[in-house]
Image (spheres, helix red, strand yellow):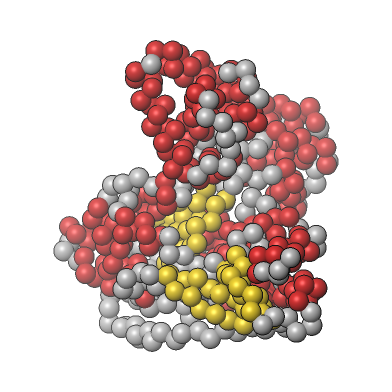
Amino acid sequence: MSVTANSVWNNCLAFIQDNIQPQAFKTWFEPIKPVKLSDNALSIQVPSKFFYEWLEEHYVKLLKVALTKELGENAKLVYVIKMENTYGNREPFTEQIPSSNRGSVNPQEMDVPIKSKNPELKNPFVIPGIRNIKIESQLNPNYNFDNFLEGDSNRLARSAGLAVANKPGGTSFNPLLIFGGVGLGKTHLAHAIGVEIKDKYPERTVLYISAEKFTQQYIESVKKNTRNDFIHFYQLIDVLIIDDVQFLSGKSGTQDVFFHIFNHLHQNGKQVILTSDKAPVDMQDIEQRLLSRFKWGLSAELQNPDYETRISILRNKLYRDGVEMPDDIVEYVAKHIKTNIRELEGAIISLIAQSSFNKKEVTLELAQQVVEKFVKNTKREVSIDYIQKVVSDYFEMDVATLQSKTRKRHIVQARQLAMFFAKKFTKASLASIGSQIGKRDHATVLHACKTVDNLAETDKQFRKYIEDLTKKFS
């Protein structure tokens, strides 16, 4: 059998997979594509410059061993970085970089001249703590990387955040868009990146602001006829962090001004960090030219933490508060509160408060009472797995059948209903819903939701399906 780039890389992957954690393999090796094999040199395509830097820093020895096994001692590895030209015709282009085969490397960076700040320019609006050109970052130092614990649900976002903090404006993660449901740590991570940058680069101007506050300031600048001053002020920022960017939805004037600010910052090598409750592809009433810029960098999703991560979060919280609690109680709370980190920490704080105020010992019985009340008073988010199970049971089929590729009408309708309810009752992105319901793409989910809406209006029996299932999720 002839040796090809594909066969060599597949053999390398089999070796690599046996030697690293599954999540690391999925994050850093599955996206790689073999390109060509020539003169004992294997060329592989990676998604970005940061990706290449990460591989060289963390996995170069493993890559060398794997490649040597396949091609011998003279084996070479060449990275092909597929990048998007952010100016002109936006056609993709590639950059080829040979592997260092010896640990981390410092690829050539392009120096962009940055104009010096004009000390005469006054701050055109009032933000608490900001006077003239001295800009307070508005960052919360309690939100840092030390207490943002890593788990499978946040590993990519956290790694990207650290990379940005180490080299703001110097990675391919610009902008960095962090998205996910309520209480999963988007704001925490955004602050942590800013805090880390201020620590490493105290001379850099960092500003954290909510999209709502940004909008209010813009409206005020229009009223006072100081729109240009507003734009100039934001163009001075080295690292701009905008929280809840979905708030710009439908606000065309604010989107327009943000578009100009974003372009200036990006072209001058400044870092932009955004958070949102949904992925760019799911954002409504945001201009396409702005959405396309959101996609220039990396969109990293924060998902619900798994059981092990929830345990770590609780233990870290107790340690920071100087409180000791038996393992069985920590495990009980982690097992029963799964939706988000804010609820999780809220429950443990309630438990500590109940214990100290009522002078009660923290027992499993007390934990059950607190968690039961907490869960009852908190709007629970239904999981996609649960939705699939309920829909499958209703139509008397198993989940595997629901997720299958079959085009039988009753199975297709069940699958479409599962997607419809997942969009309605969870904060998951369309892409995430499609991935979990039979590995479909976001377009399939969008089509499913439109089909369900149409059938609900025209098909009486189908409308009954929706009513019956809605009751099960209420």
94 to 310, vertically: above or below: below
Q: Which residue lies most toward the front here?
A: 1
Q: Residue at x 26, y 60 (%)?
A: 256
383 to 64, vertically: above or below: above
93 to 307, vertically: above or below: below
115 lies left or right of 82? left
Which residue occupies the foreground of this view, 464 or 221?
Answer: 464
Which percent across, then down, holds residue 17? 76, 60
Is residue 207 something one can see in this rendering?
A: no
Which percent across, then down, holds residue 263? 33, 70
Which of the 4 image quarters holds residue 364? top right
88 to 309, vertically: above or below: below
443 lies left or right of 41? left
Q: Residue at x 46, y 38 (%)?
A: 445
Is residue 40 something one can see in this rendering?
A: yes
Quadrant location, the N terminus: bottom right
Q: Residue at x 59, y 17 (%)?
A: 394
Which percent across, then down, holds residue 112? 41, 84
Which of the 4 image quarters holds residue 90? bottom left
Which percent across, then down, holds residue 386? 62, 29
Q: Residue at x 50, y 51 (%)?
A: 179
Which residue occupies the foreground of this view, 408 or 442?
Answer: 408
- The number of numbered badges drawn on the structure is 0
